[in-house]
Structure formats: structure tokens, C-alpha cells
Image: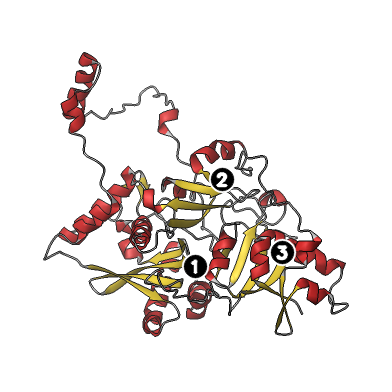
Amino acid sequence: MNENNPSIVEYFGGDTNGHSCGYCKGSNSSKSHGKFRFGMWAHSLDVQDYENLINRGWRRSGHYCYKPMMKETCCPLYTIRCDAANFQLNHSHKKVLKKVNKFLLQGGKVNKNQSIAGTSSSSSKSEDCAPAREEMAPQGSQDRKANLSEVTVERREGENWKVPQKKAKLLRLERKIQKTGSLDQKTTNQQTPSKTIEEFLVEEKSSATPAHRLEIKLVNTSADEFKETLNESAKLYAKYQMSVHKDSEDECTVEQFKRFLVKSPLQNSYDDGDLPTGYGSFHQQYYLDGKLIAVGVIDLLPSCLSSVYLFYDPDYSFLSLGTYAALREIAFVRQLTKTNPEFSWYYLGFYIHSCPKMVYKGQYRPSYLVCPETYTWQPISQCIPKLDQSKYSRLSDDTDGDSSQQSVNDSQLSEVGILHKRRAMPYAAYAMLGRKSNSADVKVVKEYASLVGIETARRMLLYRP
């Protein structure tokens, strides 16, 4: 989107030794239990280039961009996105929205150990977690919850289990179906359409004298307005990390916070006719009665909102702020779609089918995973059976699709953008400088171009010494 200020990146290559994995707790002792990835440093990134990268499995943490080595890493990570325009609330989402609405309108004492859809609201990260937290790995894992519709449980002798009683209304409905064989037209007409996110959010403001007031501010991280709230945000981040993820105080400094969640390679863009917010990196700040209680870190890209991280005040964990913020972000996408119809996707980071704490992302439907070999989007419902069989899988059934293993030919290599001694040039010109280009360098640049995509490799500038 900014031809006069191209992206500049420095490619590091792939891991030869794995790193400790925070999802399965695997060490780097073997390829079956270790995290492997390609990495590069983004000095500057055009928002369109970054969107192209995340569509090929890349992700950023500050300025550092990484792409999992899917066949080597112990826990394959698949980029996931939700079609926000057609998003459907599930039962758990509605319960969270109702709970927050009740708290805002009525206040009152709330049980902080309250459970939503079988998940403790005091849990650090499971269903109620921020939609992207790959580089700051979860501090533990738990067994995946059983699908009760597929499990038969035997009652042991001596155990006295109380069977929940069906409500009278449901019993009458069942008897009517058994008697008539179907529901009559009157009963069918009584079924009301499900509420949208927007209808739930309107209820938050239905009272002129609510018990609490919630205000959400969108702030660009490079703006002066953000600098005024930096210390407040950093303190909240430290409180969250130490309470929820058990980080030490030394791991939660202001500089660490800025490096991870404030500093961004994304170039701000304010093209006419596009989003009124512009594009780039932002913080969505949640203020309850004037107090900062949560911050959603997001990137606004040409066609999507990419969720980076969420941190919140643990004192308000009973409000399921992880889930609530995700729903708020989806509603924000739907709002911006009215201005720019092409802006319609909500990216939740990575989906990890083998990690129980990360499968919740698949509950934001309709959602899609990107195939690691063809880089095409596949409905998650079609992907899950494949991932049940193997944690790494080609998700696309199209045998004619381009493969991620396809090498870059010499003609394509010559067009890769290069930055050498502050001069932008194609690789062909760089190669003519003599010994700067050799067989080892050719191999590295071809690998880079195949991973970022040849079209993006032409647009970006790869630093070469």
C-alpha cells in the first residue's frame, strides 16, 4: 500500500535445533518434542505485505516474524480466521455477553469462580483466552475435554448419581412431538431468530443509570495519546503476566512490554476511502468506570483484524474478558465492514489441534484454516477429521494446487527485491556485483522467497550485506 516506503526484512533461516515448546512442554532433545520455525526480523512492514505473510503461515511478535516448520515442529500451528460478517454466536458466547451485560446494568456481587460452559472463569487460558498468544506460550496444559455426546459412562456400584430433571416445557414439547410426529406451524412460528452480537451490545447501554460504565478506546501505538497511557498499560500487563502466567517481576518490565506489544514494524496507512481508523498496530483499551481493566492488541490490515494479544486485570476474570474481547473484536470488524466491504475477516492467530487450550479458537464459526502446502483456506469442519488422524496434514484436497515445497526458479530469483548498501535492486543486479552472490547465498534467498511467496518477495526488500 506504500510503494515509496517498501518493507525491509532480514531473513534468519530455519532452526537446526528445536526450542522448548510451551504447548506440549516438549524439550529440544528431539524433533518429535521441540519447537522448530523459520525466522526473520522486520525492520519495516507494509500492511499488505504483512497480510500476505500471515496468509502463508507467518506471525509477528514485535518486530520478529516467524513461521513454524510444520513437518518438524512438535505442535503444528495452522493460521485460523473467522468470517466475521457471517459469524454465529454459540451458547457459551451468549452466556458471556449476558453475564457482562448483567454486571454493567445491575452490578452486584459476582461469584468469581463462576463457570461458563464448563470452563472455570478463573482459568488462565482455555476457552476464555486471547485469540493469539503463540510466542508467550501457555504455562500448562490440560487433557482435552471429552465430547459428552460420544462417551458412555458406567455408574459404579454404590454411587448415587442424581440425573438432571428436564424442564416441564421441554417435556411437554417432547410429548407433543411423540403424539403428532412433528411440530405444528404455530410452534414453529414461535421460534425467534438468534440475537446478533450487535443486539447484545446495545443492551449494555439500555439503561440511563447503569451500575457500571464500559468505554472502549482505540489508540494507535505510535500516537502521542498512547504514550500518555503507556505506564498504566504496562502496570496492567505486569499484573496479568505475574498473576495468570506466573512470570517473575523481572520478566514484566516496561521495556519488555514495549518490545513485545508496543513496538511494531507495521507502517501506518490512511488511504482515502478505506477504514476511518487507518491501518497499522493498535491497542483497544477497555475502561470500566474510568479504570483500565483490559487491553486488546490488534493489527488492522487491508482485509482483516489480526488479534495479537490480550491482557486484563485478574480481579475481573469472572467476566470472562478473553471471550468478551474476542466477541468485541468481531463486532468491530463487522462495524468496519460497512465502510470497507473487503475488510471482513477476523484472524485469531494459530490453531493448534493437538493442544487442548487452543482448540477453543475453532468455536468462532464459520472459521477456516490455511493449508500448509497450498496456502488455500479450508473450512475447519473439513479439517478436523484430518487433524484427528495426524497432527500435520495437507488440508486441501486439490491435488493441482501449488505446493509449499515448490522451489523458486532462477527467473523468479532474479526478481527478488534486495537492499544492499542502502540501495534497492533486484537480485539479478545484486548478483552482478561479483562475489556477493554465491551458491550458498542463492540457496538462502530461494528458501526465503519460497516461504514468503514470490509476489511478496518481489515487493519487499531483503537485506543483504
Q: Are marks 3 and 2 in contact (CB under 8 Å)?
A: no
Q: Is residue 430 above or below residue 448?
A: below
Q: Amino acid at mark 1?
A: Asp
Front position in the image: 334 or 111: 334
**Closer mark to the observer between disc 3 and disc 2:** 3
Could you tell me residue 324's position as x and y percent? Answer: 33, 57
Q: Are marks 1 and 2 in contact (CB under 8 Å)?
A: no
Task: Please tell me whether mark 1 sits on a helix, a strand or a loop.
Answer: loop
Judged left or right of residue 447, residue 201 is left
Q: Dot 2 surroundings within 10 Å: few (below 14), some, or many (20 or more)?
A: many
Task: Please tell me whether mark 3 sits on a helix, a strand or a loop.
Answer: helix
Q: Dot 3 surroundings within 10 Å: few (below 14), some, or many (20 or more)?
A: many
Measured in 3D between alpha carbons, the distance from the residue under mark 1 to the one under mark 3, in whole angstroms, is 34 Å
The first of marks 1 and 3 along the sequence is: 1
Which residue is labeled 1 in the image? 247
**Closer mark to the observer between disc 1 and disc 3:** 3
Front position in the image: 305 or 355: 305
Could you tell me residue 14's position as x and y percent? Answer: 72, 62
Q: Amino acid at mark 2?
A: Ser
Looking at the image, which residue is at 44% across and 34% down? 147
Looking at the image, which residue is at 56% across and 45% down? 354
Judged left or right of residue 34, residue 172 is left
Looking at the image, which residue is at 66% across and 60% down? 453
Front position in the image: 34 or 424: 424
Q: Amino acid at mark 3?
A: Tyr
Residue 23 seen in the figure: yes
Which residue is labeled 3 in the image? 448
Q: Of the numbered discs in the image, which one, if any, rests on residue 354?
A: 2
Task: Please tell me whether mark 2 sits on a helix, a strand or a loop.
Answer: loop
